[in-house]
Amino acid sequence: MWSAVRRAELCFSAAAMVMVMRQANTSSSYGGLRLATQATKELPKASTPPPAPTPLPDAPLFKAKKLEDWLGPESFQYKGLLVSREPTWKDCQDVVDRVANRGEFGEDDDIKVKGVSAKEDLVAVADKLLVKVKLPEDVCEAIRRDVLEVGATVRSLCPWSDGLDFKLEIIGENSCTRWHRDNYCARAIVTYNSGGTEYAADANVDFWELENCGNNACIIKDPSEICAVGVGDVLFMKGQKFPKGPRGLVHKSPEILYHYNGLVVNRLVLKVDVP
Ligand SMILES: [Fe+2]
């Protein structure tokens, strides 16, 4: 009797469990669909994955067609910026040597206008740089235009700067021909005769030699990979204190040259410095 009752209970329990399971399956099945439907409606759209970091370019310079191109985001990826130009002035080597030998640039071989704020008129800066020296008119025009255009571009590139230093300089034997990185924010430079600044990609530099002692031959791994900007080009070099992105372009002045008579070949250079 007991076993018959117990068997009946067990059968009832089993049947009840099957019903519960069926209900559960049914409900989870519909519930799952309902949930899926709700999820489709309620979940936010998949967000766009963040872009992969852009690898730094191998080339040290961003080469642009015009100065305005330097103001785009691409320029922050490079240690230096370049606009190559054909000179609009005739060769002025003889005049530059004459002016240098007469000492028209003073004891320091330069004419400076320092601490030019963002509000100051760049026309007045150009006047101050050019008033004391006698250079051909086409060279003066080029310098005047560069003070305005390069100066305005550097202001835009470095809006955090308190002031810019403009310098018109004669460089003869007083040049810095050892490879180095500038220990300030930045410099824009234009050379009006002879030859322009040399620079090197990081991959071509032995940085231990650069920082610790090496001479030029030890610093550069492959001399055939050294680059140089041309007369008339505008080069912007980021120094060690440039506040954002790659900085510290490795560069130097071109080798000192001499005329057949033994006198040094002088270069006329405009610098716009961001201290
Ligand atoms: Fe330098």
Image (spheres, rainbow, N blue to C red):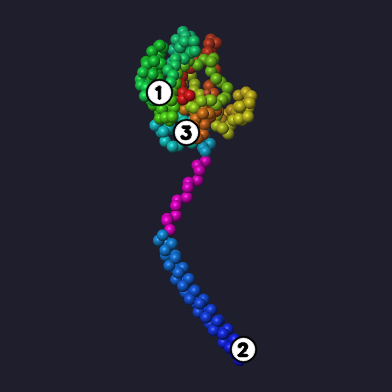
Answer left or right for 44 relative to 215: left
Q: Label 2 crowding class (10 Å Cα cut-off): few <14, some 14-19, many 20+?
A: few
Q: Quadrant of residue 158?
A: top left
What secondary structure is the magenta-colored segment mainly?
loop
Q: Quadrant of the N terminus?
A: bottom right
Q: Secondary structure at mark 1?
A: loop
**Rendering coords of residue 84 (x, y %):** 44, 28
The magenta stretch is 43-55
Amino acid type of the residue that numbered disc 3 sits on in the rendered structure: Phe
| Residue marked by disc 3 | 62
Nearer-the-camera pick, 53 or 19: 19
Distance between the Cα atoms at labels 2 and 3?
Answer: 93 Å
- CA distance for labels 2 and 1: 105 Å
- What label does residue 3 carry, if any? 2
Residue name at image x 53 percent, y 13 percent: 264
User: Residue drawn at (49%, 10%), measured in percent from left and top?
Assistant: 107
Q: Give, as a three-letter code, the residue at label 2.
A: Ser
Q: Disc 1 residue type?
A: Ser
- Residue under the point 47% across and 74% down: 26
Nearest the eye: 220 or 22: 22
Mark with earlier residue (1, 3): 3
Q: Specify the quadrant of the image occupied by residue 234.
A: top left
Residue 273, given in percent of the width and then of the height, sits at 46, 23
Q: Quadrant of residue 201?
A: top right
Q: Position of residue 67 (x, y in %)?
A: 40, 30
Q: Earlier in the sequence, mark 2 or mark 1?
A: 2
